[in-house]
């Protein structure tokens, strides 16, 4: 969350920043939002937003008056110093999948695995119905339900879909980074958004 | 205060001054009792299908039907439904469809009216002055098809977090959220916006069926402190508009002190505002124009109200104005 005076915001062009992102996110961003402006706000961590022209104009205005936006435009995700370097938002991933008409970098999870995941749980091998490359150990993997909707993000514990297929039923194959259940839990319990 | 008023107040558990005012508003003791009786009835929750995330609302209806929910279309709003039956589990606020942002959940359907009446376009630059928890901001984003601009203001730290979460959950891309008191908006944005929505913080005297504690918790002092704040908000909202810009003022209160009297005082101080006729999807009740002999500005006659005993929804006040 952005946090008032302790947060500093800077703007960047999509072209300048795209190299910082995973290939499927940066390619989509360059294609779909080439004219947009990115807003990078850094407090305890860096959050990245995509701004249309009218939004960029307002953000300029408020920044010039020393006001920090709490959020703005499309939330692209969070930039980190360590690995994974970037945690995309579930909204941008869903948008990418809808736009390109296929899923990449994801596990599709059965309902019995989705339920505990939406309470903050991790993903076990037995609940994974499908795996979409590229998947890399210690990197973000999207978690989809059987309805092919993005329900959250995990940190992969396998290096490929082949490795996943070699795992045993009860092996943990992704730890929970973020799930949409947080929209309730975060409000009620004040739980932090990303578990990494 | 008459004995009948005191007796009604005692029977329904209200502060007597409130019931006395309802008699002044409605002019008929029998209708006052109808109002009090309507406040005792539970409202059906409503949901708005979020077209920013779903292209076809039938998918939402079908998914919720499979979970055991029974929905009924709201006749004046094609993308919203009243929930007429709910399963024991899950609750409406915890389904996967809710978490995915397929719908926004309302405690009653009156909240659908203000954005519908203001009807911002894709070219508009809109300010929502008291935006949390985000029902009206996300509704306007839906009407604007995620284009144009909405500046959503909320001063409270916890509430601004809820606002951001709802904006994110529902996939809104055209909003800038600022932690800012609406009473400061014109200092930052002078003559800037083409539309403004002011759902002014109020006593909630129109949502007693949702929060019965409001029967007794508002003192006359509290009421007047809301009145002062509402005037400041409205003045600021007007100053943040461009010439020709429109503002919709609304509250979830039936108290004239928070509605007609606020508008009347602000309109009298300015010669650059005109009140517009409302094109509402439901037939609104007329505003209060006679109230304890107070001289209410003529222009307020064009505003409208909803009442629980007439409209089967929360008690709202709605007024549309244009800056000349």
Image (cartoon, helix red, strand yellow):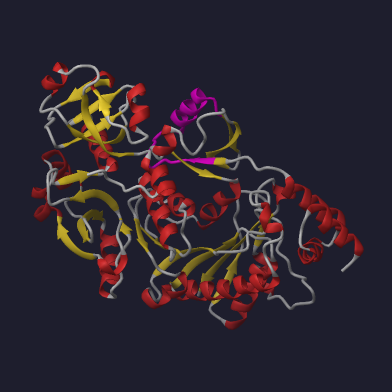
The answer to which of A135 and A24 lies nearer the viewer is A135
The answer to whether residue A49 is left or right of residue B94 is: left
Q: Is residue B235 above or below residue B138?
A: below
Rendered residue at 50%/31% (across/down): B90
* Res. A115 in view: yes
Find residue B130 and report its horizontal and vertical position in percent.
Answer: 48, 63
Say whether residue B67 is magenta. Answer: yes
Identify the image quadrant of the N terminus of chain B.
bottom right
Find residue A154 and report its horizontal and vertical position in percent.
Answer: 23, 35
- The quadrant holding residue B175 is bottom left
- The quadrant holding residue B206 is bottom right
The answer to which of B6 and B258 lies nearer the viewer is B6
Q: Is residue A137 above or below residue B310?
A: above
Q: In this view, does A65 lie above or below B161?
A: below
Rendered residue at 66%/70% (across/down): B223
Rendered residue at 67%/55% (across/down): B213
The answer to whether residue B165 is left or right of residue B26 is: left
The answer to which of B205 and B274 lies nearer the viewer is B205
The answer to whether residue B286 is left or right of residue A191 is: right
Magenta stretch?
A: B47-69
Residue at the far right in the pictured view: B3
Find residue A27 and report its horizontal and vertical position in percent.
Answer: 13, 42
Find residue A143 and report its horizontal and vertical position in percent.
Answer: 26, 31
Say whether residue B260 is magenta. Answer: no
Residue at the far front in the pictured view: A170
The answer to whether residue A24 is left or right of residue B189 is: left
């Amino acid at each position: 969350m952005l946090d008032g005076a302790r947060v500093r915001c800077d703007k960047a062009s999509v072209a300048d920043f795209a190299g910082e992102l995973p290939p499927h996110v940066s390619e989509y961003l360059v294609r779909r939002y080439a004219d947009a402006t990115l807003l990078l706000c850094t407090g305890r961590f860096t959050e990245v937003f995509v701004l249309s022209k009218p939004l960029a104009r307002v953000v300029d205005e408020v920044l010039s008056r020393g006001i920090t936006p709490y959020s703005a435009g499309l939330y692209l995700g969070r930039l980190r110093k360590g690995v994974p370097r970037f945690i995309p938002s579930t909204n941008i991933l869903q948008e990418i999948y809808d736009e390109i008409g296929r899923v990449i970098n994801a596990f599709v999870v059965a309902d019995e695995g989705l339920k505990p995941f939406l309470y903050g749980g991790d993903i076990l091998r037995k609940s994974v119905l499908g795996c979409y490359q590229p998947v890399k150990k210690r990197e973000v993997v999207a978690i989809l339900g059987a309805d092919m909707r993005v329900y959250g993000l995990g940190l992969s514990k396998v290096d490929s879909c082949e490795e996943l297929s070699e795992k045993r039923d009860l092996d943990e194959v992704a730890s929970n980074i973020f799930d949409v259940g947080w929209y309730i839990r975060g409000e009620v319990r004040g739980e932090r958004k990303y578990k990494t | 205060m008459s004995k009948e008023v005191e007796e009604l107040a005692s029977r329904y558990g209200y502060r007597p001054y409130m019931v006395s005012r309802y008699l002044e508003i409605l002019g008929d003791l029998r209708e006052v009792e109808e109002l009090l009786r309507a406040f005792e009835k539970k409202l059906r929750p409503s949901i708005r299908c979020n077209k920013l995330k779903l292209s076809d609302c039938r998918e939402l209806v079908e998914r919720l039907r499979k979970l055991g929910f029974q929905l009924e279309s709201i006749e004046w709003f094609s993308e919203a439904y009243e929930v007429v039956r709910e399963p024991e589990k899950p609750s409406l606020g915890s389904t996967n469809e809710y978490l995915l942002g397929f719908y926004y959940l309302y405690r009653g359907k009156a909240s659908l009216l203000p954005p519908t009446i203001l009807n911002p376009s894709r070219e508009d630059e809109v300010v929502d002055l008291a935006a949390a928890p985000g029902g009206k901001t996300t509704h306007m984003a839906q009407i604007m098809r995620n284009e144009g601009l909405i500046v959503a203001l909320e001063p409270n730290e916890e509430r601004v977090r809820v606002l951001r979460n709802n904006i994110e959950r529902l996939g809104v891309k055209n909003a800038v959220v600022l932690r800012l008191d609406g009473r400061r908006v014109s200092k930052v944005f002078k003559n800037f916006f083409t539309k403004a929505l002011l759902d002014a913080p109020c006593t909630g005297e129109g949502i007693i069926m949702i929060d019965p504690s409001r029967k007794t918790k508002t003192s006359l002092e509290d009421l007047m402190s809301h009145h002062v704040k509402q005037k400041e908000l409205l003045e600021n909202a007007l100053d943040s508009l461009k010439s020709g810009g429109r503002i919709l003022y609304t509250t979830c209160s039936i108290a004239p002190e928070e509605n007609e009297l606020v508008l009347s005082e602000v309109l009298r101080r300015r010669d650059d505002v005109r009140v517009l006729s409302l094109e509402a999807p439901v037939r609104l009740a007329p505003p209060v124009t006679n109230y304890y002999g107070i001289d209410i500005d003529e222009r307020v006659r064009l505003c409208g109200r909803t009442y629980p005993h007439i409209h089967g929804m929360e008690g709202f006040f709605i007024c549309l104005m244009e800056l000349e």
